[in-house]
Amino acid sequence: MTNTEANIPPEVADLAANGRKSLARSWREHLGLTKEQVAVRMNISPAALEQIEARTAKPRRATLAKVAEALGVQVEQLIR
């Protein structure tokens, strides 16, 4: 699936590619949300969210679904 098919704005794709960030972190930053805000929405600690957002992390789909809900995006928009 390409970024266009997943409906990922160019700004988010650029953050992920150029900033070497995960799509989850890129979306959060694009939306202007802090780690703390998203962590509260997910009922987890900011440190746990930081682990999920790590570029090398491989979160389960269920975890990505929680992140997507907290960000207001679709799970497919968090998968490369």
Image (tube, helix red, strand yellow):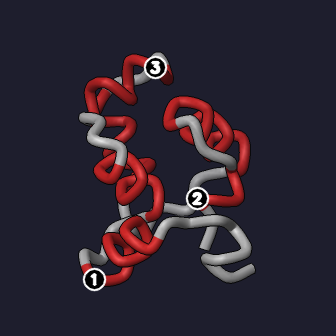
Residue at 72% of width from left, 50% of height from top? 61
Residue at 61% of width from left, 77% of height from top? 3
The residue pinned by badge 1 equals 18
Quadrant hosting residue 79: bottom right
Q: Which residue type does callout 1 highlight?
A: Asn
Mark 1 touches mark 3? (CB < 8 Å): no
Mark 2 touches mark 1? (CB < 8 Å): no
Q: Earlier in the sequence, mark 2 or mark 3?
A: 3
Mark 2 touches mark 3? (CB < 8 Å): no
Q: Tell me if mark 3 has few (under 14), some (14-19) or many (20+) residues whose alpha carbon lies within 10 angstroms of its own.
A: some
Image quadrant where one finds the N terminus: bottom right
The residue nearer to you, when weighing 17 against 59, is: 17
Q: Which residue type does callout 3 highlight?
A: Arg
Q: Earlier in the sequence, mark 2 or mark 1?
A: 1
- Mark 3 lies on a secondary structure that is helix
Image quadrant where one finds the C terminus: bottom right
Give residue 55's position: percent from left, percent from top: 38, 68
Q: Tell me if mark 1 has few (under 14), some (14-19) or many (20+) residues whose alpha carbon lies within 10 angstroms of its own.
A: few
Identify the disc placed on residue 78.
Answer: 2
Give residue 63's position: percent from left, percent from top: 62, 41
